Amino acid sequence: MKPALDENLAACHTCDKVSDLSHPHCPRCGAPLHGRKQDSIQRCLALGFAGILAYIPANLMPIMLVTQLGVEEPSTILGGVATFWEMHAYPVAITIFIASVMIPGLKFLALGFLCAAATGKITMDPPFANRIYWLTELVGRWSMVDVFVVAILVGLVHMGDLMTIRPGPAAIAFGAMVILTMLAAHAFDPKLIWDQIRKSQNKPLSK
């Protein structure tokens, strides 16, 4: 069975209607029609590197500022993990570490491996690559747990001059990092990995 691209057909990236590529726009929704996401790897890498640049200050700068009895104490993500660990709140510490530190780091690595596989730098089984891509998009929504916690604390903990909690600069960097990685995952086209396999097998592939 030939791929749809060899038959000059492609599914719309907006509504999934399969149409002839001779039409510049989808006949159903009017979105631009193309066989593969345009400049997919370049946009994925650019957004991924921008996300890494935001990931560094997100972990090094304070994510919230706690003012208690006139004394302000900044708290970073890793500092919060250490505090919860010392309080023997192990599930909370582990959850924050996994969602805010480990998952974003693994997401950057996954996007890097996917781009390398799509360009032929490494060999990856396409079904396995598709599962990695699916997981990368799935876990992206859980990466904002720290920002949600800070937002809830800011709204709940306000005791006049006794204690106040304000979001720190890392909250903005962290939110930007999550958005950039989600956009990077959305920009990547997993079909490029199958194209690379076909290219390595010297099979024809329409443009």
Image (tube, rainbow, N blue to C red):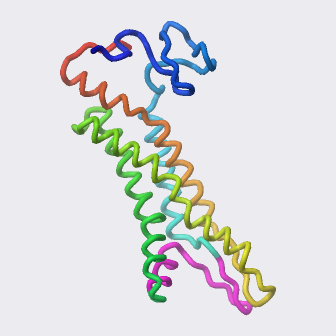
Please state, as top left, top right, bottom left or bottom right, where the N terminus lies in the image. top left
Image spot of residue 114 (x, y percent): 34, 41
Q: Which residue ends up furthest to the right in the rendered image?
A: 160
Image spot of residue 33 (x, y percent): 53, 18
Residue, x 50% and y 67% (percent of image)? 59
Quick check: is 98 in the magenta stretch? no
Q: Which residue ends up furthest to the left in the rendered image?
A: 201
Image spot of residue 54 (x, y percent): 53, 57
Q: Considering depth in this image, is 49 or 156 the residue closer to the camera?
A: 156
Residue 9, placed above or below residue 139 = above
Please state, as top left, top right, bottom left or bottom right, where the C terminus lies in the image. top left
Image quarter of residue 169: bottom right
In-image side of 35 versus 33 (left or right):
left
Residue, x 48% and y 17% (percent of image)? 18
Residue, x 46% and y 64% (percent of image)? 99
Q: Considering depth in this image, is 143 or 181 the residue closer to the camera?
A: 143
Quick check: is 74 in the magenta stretch? yes
Image spot of residue 61 (x, y percent): 56, 70
Q: Which residues are magenta?
A: 65-85
Residue, x 51% and y 58% (percent of image)? 142
Q: Considering depth in this image, is 100 or 152 the residue closer to the camera?
A: 152
Residue 190, placed above or below residue 170 = above
In-image side of 114 versus 138 (left or right):
left
